[in-house]
Image (cartoon, helix red, strand yellow):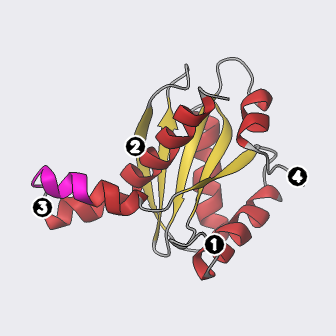
Amino acid sequence: MSGNLKTLGELRDALKRGERLMGVDLGSKTIGLALSDLSLTVATPLETIRRAKFTADAKRLLDLAAEHGVGGLIVGLPLNMDGSEGPAVQSARAFVRNLEKLSPIPLAFWDERLSTAAVTRTLLEADTSRARRAEVVDKMAAAYILQGALERLRTL
C-alpha cells in the first residue's frame, strides 16, 4: 500500500512500544475521536471536532495524536451496506490522502458499517437525551470503530 496507508497487521507492526491507536469517525459535520489504552485492548471516546476547514481539523487531530502518544490511526470507512463505495467513502479517502501529506503517522481503514446506528441504539437504551446523544455519538462511534479494530488485532 502507498504512503502511510497500511493493513491492520502492518499498522500494528509499525507501532513502537508505548504508542496508542486513535480511532477516527469522519462525519460531514464532525470528526469523532477515540483513544486506545497502552495495551491496545480498550477504546475510550476522546473528543468530537466540529468540522471547519481541512487544515484546522487536521491540526487538531494531529495535535491530539501527539499529545496522547498515538502511533497509528484507525479511520472508519463508511461503506454502503452492500459493501460498495459511495460519496462518503470517497470523502474519507480524500481526507486520508490530504492527512498523509501532513504527517507520517501510519493509518488503516476499518469498515464502520452500522457503528453510528449501534452507538445510537445503545444511547437510546440508556435513555440519553437527544441533546446529549448529539454531543457524544461521534466520539462514541469512533470508540466503536477502534474497539472493532483492536479486537481484530488480537486475532492477527
Please say if the residues under marks 4 and 3 sit with CB atoms less than 8 Å apart. Answer: no
Q: Position of residue 3 (x, y in %)?
A: 88, 52
What range of the chain is rendered magenta? 121-127
Q: Secondary structure at mark 3?
A: loop
Query: Is disc 2 in contact with disc 1, using a CB cutoff of under 8 Å?
Result: no
Q: Which residue is mark 2?
A: 45
Q: Earlier in the sequence, mark 3 or mark 1?
A: 1
In the picture, measured across the screen, residue 59 lies left or right of residue 2, that is: left
Amino acid bearing label 2:
Pro
Instruction: Measure how far apart labels 4 and 3 are at the Cα level.
Output: 43 Å
Q: Residue at x 64, y 59 (%)?
A: 58
Tell me how far mark 4 sits from mark 1, CA to CA.
17 Å
The C terminus sits in image quarter: top right
Going from N to C along the chain, the mark reached first, 2 or 1, is: 2
Q: Is residue 90 left or right of residue 100?
A: left
44, above or below 115, in the image: above
Between disc 2 and disc 1, the foreground one is 1
Tell me the amino acid under the disc marked 4.
Answer: Met
| Residue 140 % position (x, y) | 37, 50
Q: Does 120 sit left or right of 128 as displayed?
A: right
Q: CA distance from mark 4 to mark 2?
A: 29 Å
The residue carrying mark 3 is 129
Q: Judge depth for marks 4 and 3 and give the one in front.
A: 4
Q: Which residue is mark 4?
A: 1
Residue hosting label 1: 89
| Type of amino acid at the residue the image marks with label 1 | Val
Q: Position of residue 70 (x, y in %)?
A: 64, 35
Quick one: SS at disc 4? Answer: loop
Q: Residue at x 23, y 51 (%)?
A: 122
Q: Nearer the viewer, mark 3 or mark 1?
A: 1
Look at the numbered discs 4 and 2 and tell me whether their residues touch, using CB distance below 8 Å.
no
Q: Is 66 included in the stretch rendered in magenta?
A: no
